[in-house]
Amino acid sequence: MSSILTPHSLKCPLGPCVLSVVLAFAAYAGTPFAVADEPPTPAKEKPAAAAWKSLEIKEGSSWVESRFGGDGEIKIKEGVISLGFGDPLTGVRWEGEFPKQNYEISLEARRTNGFDFFCGMTLPVGDQRFSLILGGWGGSLIGLSSIGGMDAANNETMMIREFEQNRWYKIRMRVTDKKLVTWLDDDEIIEFVRDDRPLDIRAELEESTPVGFAAFQCESEIRNVRVRELAKP
């Protein structure tokens, strides 16, 4: 059995300096001399997202009434969309440019009167679509609608949370070809890993497509809507 060689166990007629060079070369060539561990290769930095782009809320912009039938009054003033009490729905949709996949959207929303969902946000996801529901079924239900034909009240994304009246909530949604992720006030609340189940919306929200906001039998407000594209995962 071979043994580990060190400068002290070898004698070189050319002297200790030359011996050190020989041993260093041998170590480089793969002989069993102890060598220092190489530093780990740094991980690739995650590609930065594009800059946020505002979906401007003002008269004459790309926001239009959704016209569900039974709509309440809609006002656009000082950067805020006000959705009046509808029977049952009031909403607006965005008719400007918008990505279909690998993007994030952020906004602020609040319920000012009533007790049902104050933010039903419909978004594209590739060649499909879905809705994020905040405050449904009497004011507290959260979920994605619909997954495999199951709406927000009946799939694994459903949760219950109390929403305060007249309080602005920060909402952010990430849509990629792998996941749908939701943040509420900077807390991640939903991470849905996409599978082979189709994504779609309830028929009542058809007028919200491709990008829209709706309120169900309540009064609500939307502001600071922004979008940014993401590098493909």
Image (spheres, rainbow, N blue to C red):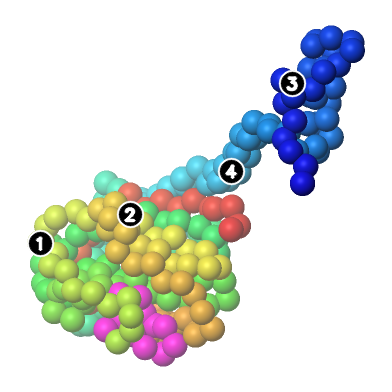
Q: Which residue is mark 4?
A: 43
Q: Earlier in the sequence, mark 4 or mark 2?
A: 4
Residue toward you, 149 or 110? 149
Q: Which residue is mark 2?
A: 107
Q: Which residue is mark 1?
A: 165
For the residues carrying marks 4 and 2, which lies nearer the camera in this image? Answer: 4
Q: Which residue is mark 3?
A: 7
Q: Residue, x 44% and y 67% (percent of image)?
A: 180
Q: CA distance from mark 3 to mark 4?
A: 37 Å
Residue numbers of the magenta segment? 143-153
Circles 3 and 4 in contact, beta carbons < 8 Å: no
Position of 173 with respect to 117 (left or right) is right
Circles 1 and 2 in contact, beta carbons < 8 Å: no
Q: Secondary structure at mark 3?
A: helix
Residue type (three-letter) at the residue carrying disc 4: Ala
Using the image, determine if residue 13 lies above or below residue 195: above
Residue type (three-letter) at the residue carrying disc 2: Leu
For the residues carrying marks 3 and 4, which lies nearer the camera in this image? Answer: 3
For the residues carrying marks 4 and 1, which lies nearer the camera in this image? Answer: 4
